[in-house]
Amino acid sequence: MEFKDRILVCRDCSKEFMFTAIEQDFFTQKGFNDPLCCKECRMTKKNRKENPNLNRQMYKIICAKCGKKAEVSFKPREGRESYCRLCHRSLNL
């Protein structure tokens, strides 16, 4: 089967990207579907999976149990206690 370069549109960033004949041949041999995302978006997703806390916004708290400063990955709500990681584990929630 002969392949020709094709332009696809990334479903994440909506940019056009080239799906080369060589890539198409490789994808076909491996039984893969055509890519839905450009290389940059695929790499971003891969990095996010490998380092899930890399770009996560963190919020500073004072632990309600031990009083130490800590950071949590959720926005604390007023009137609700927040705990550091160690104290949260000890609560057995």
Image: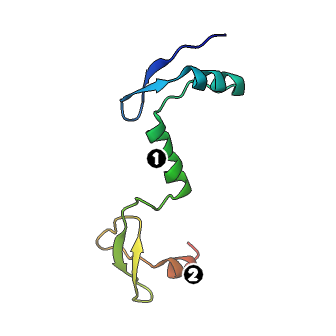
Q: CA distance from mark 2 to mark 1?
A: 35 Å
Give the residue type at disc 1: Thr
Amino acid type assigned to the residue bearing label 2 in the image? Ser
Residue occupying image coordinates x 41% and y 70%: 72
The residue under label 2 is 90
Q: Who is closer to the viewer here, 86 or 22?
A: 22
Residue 50 drawn at (x, y percent): 56, 55
Residue 65, picture quadrant: bottom left
- Residue under the image location 64 percent in, 21 percent down: 25
Quick one: quadrant of the C terminus?
Answer: bottom right
92 and 14: which one is in front? Answer: 14
Describe the element under mark 2 as helix, strand or loop.
helix
Q: In the rendering, at what x and y percent does residue 29 appear?
A: 71, 24
SS of the residue at dot 1? helix
Residue at the image position 48 percent from the left and 17 percent from the top: 6
Q: Please state if 78 lies on the left or on the right of 47 as rendered.
A: left
Q: Which residue is mark 1?
A: 44
Q: Residues within 10 Å of mark 1 (few under 14, many from 20)?
A: few
Determine whether, in the image, residue 75 is placed left or right of residue 34.
Answer: left
Q: How many marks?
A: 2
Q: Are marks 2 and 1 in contact (CB under 8 Å)?
A: no
Query: Given the current orientation, which residue lies at the most extreme left position?
Result: 78
- Spot the residue most to the top: 1
Sequence-first disc among 2 and 1: 1
- In the image, residue 50 sits, relative to residue 60, either above or below, namely above
Name the disc covering residue 25, or none. Answer: none
> In the image, residue 34 lies at what x, y percent?
56, 24
Q: Is residue 92 above or below residue 5?
A: below
